[in-house]
Image (cartoon, helix red, strand yellow):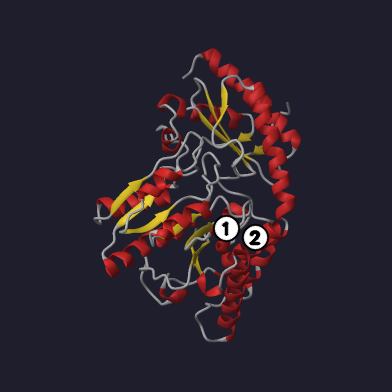
Amino acid sequence: MSVGRSIYLDHSATTPTDPRVVDVMMPYFTEHYGNPSSVHRYGRLAEQAIEDARDTLAQILNCKSSEIVFTSGGSESDNLAIRGAAWTARQSDGSRHLVISPIEHEAVRVTVEQLATVMGFEREIISVDRYGSVLVDDYTQSMRDDTSVVSIVYANNEVGTIQSIAELSTIAHERNALFHTDAVQAAGQLTLDVQKLGVDMLSISAHKFYGPKGVGALFVRDGIELTPSQSGGGHENNRRAGTHNTPSIVGMATALQIAYDEFEYHTAHYRTMRDRLIDGVLSNVPGAHLTGHPEQRLPSHASFVLDGIDGNLLLTHLDLKGVAASSGSACKTGNPEPSEVLLAMGYSEETALGSLRLTVGRQTTAEDIDYVVDVLAETVKKLAKMKIV
């Protein structure tokens, strides 16, 4: 094994910005830097770039350009969708019942928790099975006449399980509830066709598909009113105040276009690398168990629990060997508490503390995978001998 080797297997946390995206962004920092709300030529050029980007996203999502709202990222998109739709529904007809799964990203779970504990909404958390798949019968029974918003993650960030969004959205609509999905992990790897998915709102974040950090978008179906989460000017059709981040919006649209223009090539590569990784870990690393659905999972995603191993300690040892990995959500890594996602899937607290997430990317090679498997096997055996739990 090479000394000083560096391998990045944390693409679910973030991805490197594609150089083609950086090239497209640069003129909007140095030449076309006008405020898109200004009426002069500089402003008009920036505004046109933003509207072109909006058209690009709308084409990929199969929606109207007017249904795209630009945000600062996935968390803001989730917040705006859930809080904005919930407040509007409550003001309209008094409905205040919200439904989510226990494996949502913190941006969804914490938002719904705040609405329930501080604002008087009623929260219902449905069940998932040991793979992290929503139990459809439990989900269906959770629907009520006063259910206003349902939010189910498209693909989970910690274990990679993909949900049957089209089926779940149909069930929600039968009770006249709005359906939102957090598609942050899915973007670039699964279809984002909102007509096929049947969703009312959908969140994405550029840095998960080789775009810049700090920018995202929310699809909001025509006719849905959102109470804005931040006040100010009338930007984004009065749905999101604040000066547009022109370079990043342009970069996001370019990154998403590249991701879907090259979709078959990249997803095939992800699957090949992922499967090699899963096979290697399960065959060579003692006490390793795959988490998440064995088939309905993101093409780039592999996640495990390791018997008797502390996940955060393992990450430190892997880092010293040049391997960048995660114990789950990037928003939770470093937290000694067990993963709430794994607990909801039925794992014990002790087992959940031994979680490991390895997510491949465009530059990942077979040699990288083989090196990581060797390092992981060696490290786990070393920690087991030291009896560090």
Residue 301 x/y as whole percent? 61, 40
What residue do we see at 48% from left, 18% from top? 388
Residue 27 x/y as whole percent? 65, 71
Badge 1 marks a residue whose secondary structure is helix
CA neighbours of label 1 inside 10 A, class few (<14), some (14 to 19), many (20+):
many
Question: Along the polypeptide, which appears first: circle 1 or circle 2?
Answer: 1
What residue do we see at 49% from left, 20% from top? 308
Residue 158 x/y as whole percent? 51, 40
Are the residues flagged by discs 1 and 2 in contact, CB closer than 8 Å? yes
Badge 2 marks a residue whose secondary structure is helix
Left-right relation of 61 to 338: right
Task: From the viewer's side, name the closer residue of 166 and 86.
Answer: 166
Residue holding disc 1: 206
Against 187, is 13 above or below?
above
Query: What is the number of the mark on residue 255?
Result: 2
- Mark 1–mark 2 distance (CA, rounded to whole Å): 7 Å
